[in-house]
Amino acid sequence: MSNIYLRLMEVSDTEKIVAWRNHDRVRRNFIYQQLFTPEGHMNWIRTQIEPGHVIQFIICETETDRAVGSVYFRDIDREKGCAEYGIFIGEDDAVGKGYGTQAAKEALRYAFESLRLQRVFLRVFADNVGARKSYENAGFRLIEGKQEEVTIEGVSRKVVFMECFGTECAQKTCAETEIKMSQLVSFVIPCYRSAQTIGKVIEEIETTMKGLEQYRYEIVLVNDCSPDDTFEVIRGICAEKKEVCGINLAKNFGQHAALMAGFHHVHGDIVVCLDDDGQTPADEVGKLLAKIEEGYDAVYARYAHKQHSGFRNFGSKINELMTRVMLGKPKELYLSSYFAARRFIIEEMIRYANPYPYVMGLVLRTTKKIANADVNHREREVGTSGYTIGKLLGLWFNGFTAFSIKPLRIATAIGVLTACAGFLYGIYTVIKKFVNPDVVIGFSSLMSAIVFLGGMMMLMLGIIGEYVGRIYISMNNSPQYVIRECIDERE
């Protein structure tokens, strides 16, 4: 068993990393000599880690779970299949224990098997003999004839390059130790009239995650002011299970606002959203997570046969058409309420403060690396859907008014076409009168034209008014949601 394991770096590790990188021993053997600051590290997260250019891990001791250092892959080029490797052991008492070699082997295994990279290279000072030996033990080999000179504090030092390829031989070397990724998965579940179903959903998540040993998990339950005793059930679950967080909204804000409330309370590297009624199969979450591990930023569950009512299926088809036409969704991509997304997607989404959130639109505007995973869709065991025609219409309006100006452009185009048609019809009427002076202009056609034009103008004004009204409400800082109570005993 390895003495260390790797976990993905979290924002809470910032203080440790800044201290480690500013340690004299670490700086002395690091090519980049600049002092680290919390602000600089947060910028590193925003500009490098969240977009996927960098993947950074924390090295932890297996017995104590103590963080002792960090490894990372930077400048990840998935098309060429290569990346640069870096490492630093921050704790003095962890130096000389072979952690660097073990961490390199585990990181390389992840690079070759999960990231599907073909080549990993690194730069190291030529006079850092201990580090070079450690890299060689992990499978790196010196690149003959490739080196450079850097000047640090007036002293010139030689830098050499080493590389490791994802060949069968290299992968066997990397497989000598077993990697413990221990990624945290956060489940966010909006709850409405789910007092009888949410307990079963939680049990299914627990059973499923026990079989996915490479992940830890937490659950955030958001009660959207349900009229039954849903929050009392949530309160009981939170008392029994410390990995569950319960949020009680002060009024019914809708499913998407409830999701946004949950997003502000997650800590996970991957966030999974699903329904509270058991129709979305929590026992198939592994399919979504597997797609995330393939490199996608978001993965939506796709159902071969949906078990919703005809009304809900019709609403879904309208929503599908709206997202494709108004939001530019690819035709082959299926969107559903059951999806998984990387942390940087969620971080970008919670920056959205508009009181009319539309989660699908937020995902579509953040990334193009979206995939589907085929799962089953179950019949609803208890109750009926909380979506009414009014709520569905409100959801569609949220989608295209918050993320698209195409309706305004369509209104402009229709206005131009109508004006042109009216102008041409006027010319036709004049010519017709000259050709046949006895012709009588019909009252019916005149009324039809007036009614048609009046209706079109009212429609256009309505669309414009919808946009203006939402701007007004947003300027008044109307909240996305209001939390009445939060139960959070997570460590």
Image: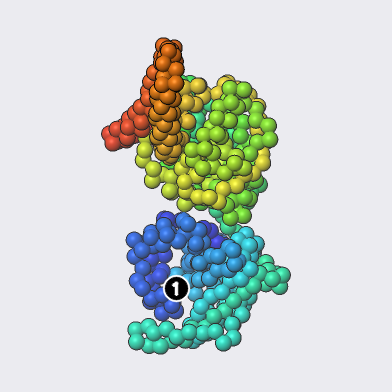
Q: How is the image coloured?
A: rainbow
Q: Position of residue 175 (x, y in %)?
A: 67, 66
114 up-or-down from 333: above or below: below
Can residue 418 be seen from the camera position used here? no
Q: Residue at x 41, y 57 (%)?
A: 46
Q: Residue at x 44, y 73 (%)?
A: 92
Q: Residue furthest right?
A: 168
Q: Which residue is mark 1?
A: 92
Choose top left, top right, bottom left or bottom right for residue 137.
Answer: bottom right
Q: Residue at x 50, y 58 (%)?
A: 52
Viewer-side residue, 11 vs 244: 11
Q: Position of residue 293 (x, y in %)?
A: 60, 54
Three-letter code, disc 1: Asp
Viewer-side residue, 76 vs 215: 76
Q: Quadrant of the N terminus?
A: bottom right
Choose top left, top right, bottom left or bottom right for residue 430.
Answer: top left
Q: Residue furthest left?
A: 476
Can residue 370 be seen from the camera position used here? yes
Q: Secondary structure at mark 1?
A: helix
Viewer-side residue, 390 vs 299: 390
176 up-or-down from 236: above or below: below
Mark 1 closeness class: few <14, some 14–19, many ≥20 residues within 10 Å: few
Q: Position of residue 135 (x, y in %)?
A: 57, 77
The count of marks equals 1
Q: Position of residue 350 (x, y in %)?
A: 41, 44
Q: Residue at x 55, y 65 (%)?
A: 77
279 up-or-down from 114: above or below: above
